[in-house]
Image (cartoon, helix red, strand yellow):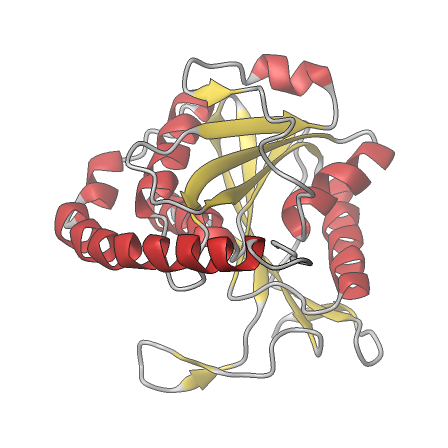
Amino acid sequence: MPNTLMHCPLFMWSIEQHGPLPKCKEGILIAGLPGIGNVGKMTVDFILEQIKAKKLCTFFSYSLPASVLVNEQHMVDLPNIALYHKKGNYRCKDLFILAGDAQPAEEHASYQLVEKILEIGEKVGVKEVITLGGIGLGNLPQAPKIYCTGNCKAIIDRYASPMINRELYGVVGPIIGTTGLLLGLGKKKNIEGIALLAETLGHPMYLGIKGSKQLISVLNDSLKLNLDVSSFAKGIKDVDGELGNAAKKTSKELRKYKNALLTKETSYIG
């Protein structure tokens, strides 16, 4: 039976612990929850599939979307967020991976979730956080760029790579949800954090497969994960071609909508 770490009131978080928490000296937490293009989610899901990490904790809150998901057994599950662990030689460090079905709907719930994650991170020895997300563009990027930012210069220097563009100021606005808060609140706890952000089409129905593949390549190189990146790319040509054709049409519609807004006296582009 899972052990309950804590049970929170309505709109807060209940956390189930699946076995004892490990202890390590310098763990790395990689976080990729659903967001723009789902690039972060696809990336961590692929890593989890490859390294066979063990589930440590499951997070649940009434602030998650009011829906259920149909699983591979054709049954329904409530949405949840989970923390996984894999002991190994990833730059001689253990990996902790945050994955899930959704992000909290309310801002205060996002803060609460991140505080709980960092609290557990401190207990297990996490010293470094890598968050993954997307940069939504109005046009479909053929060769998505990867940008980075962080909560201290040291970690940005440590992950310096020809594959990563460090000139992010002016490219994006606020980094929302867990992708940003893990860095901001992590800084208060002296946990170094970096965000890796992949360009993708800024449309809710688009999957940023190319952007996710770029993130996988960056992490594989930086952390020596020994991932079989080619297995992620299987079938990508056909899928990406279909999505690309739909996205091109979507891009035209978005530009048309944007131009229509700009012709009005008062307009807001979000």
Can you say whether 138 is above or below 6 in the image? above
Q: Is residue 178 visible?
A: yes
Which of the 4 image quadrants contains residue 211? top left
Say which quadrant the N terminus sits in: bottom right
Residue 263: x and y in percent read: 55, 55
Residue drawn at 71 percent across, 79 percent down: 62
Task: Give the residue displayed 67% in from the left and 53% down from the top.
Answer: 177
Q: Position of residue 42 (x, y in %)?
A: 40, 51
Tell me: 200 left or right of 62.
left
How many marks do you count on the picture? 0
Does 73 sit above or below residue 159? below
The answer to whether residue 47 is left or right of residue 109 is: left
Residue 21 shows in this picture: no
- For the residue pair 153 and 70, the one nearer the viewer reads as 153
Residue under the point 41% across and 35% down: 215
Question: On the rendered structure, is 71 left or right of 261?
Answer: left
Specify whether 15 is left or right of 217. Answer: right
Give the position of the C terminus as an image quadrant: bottom right
Is residue 195 or residue 7 the one in the foreground?
Answer: 195
Residue at left 65%, top 26%? Answer: 169
Is 54 rendered above or below residue 158?
A: below
Q: Is residue 28 above or below residue 57?
A: above
Q: Position of residue 190 (x, y in %)?
A: 82, 29
Residue 138 or 84: which is nearer the viewer?
138
Q: Quadrant of residue 129?
A: top right
Residue 140: horizontal and vertical position, in percent?
34, 44
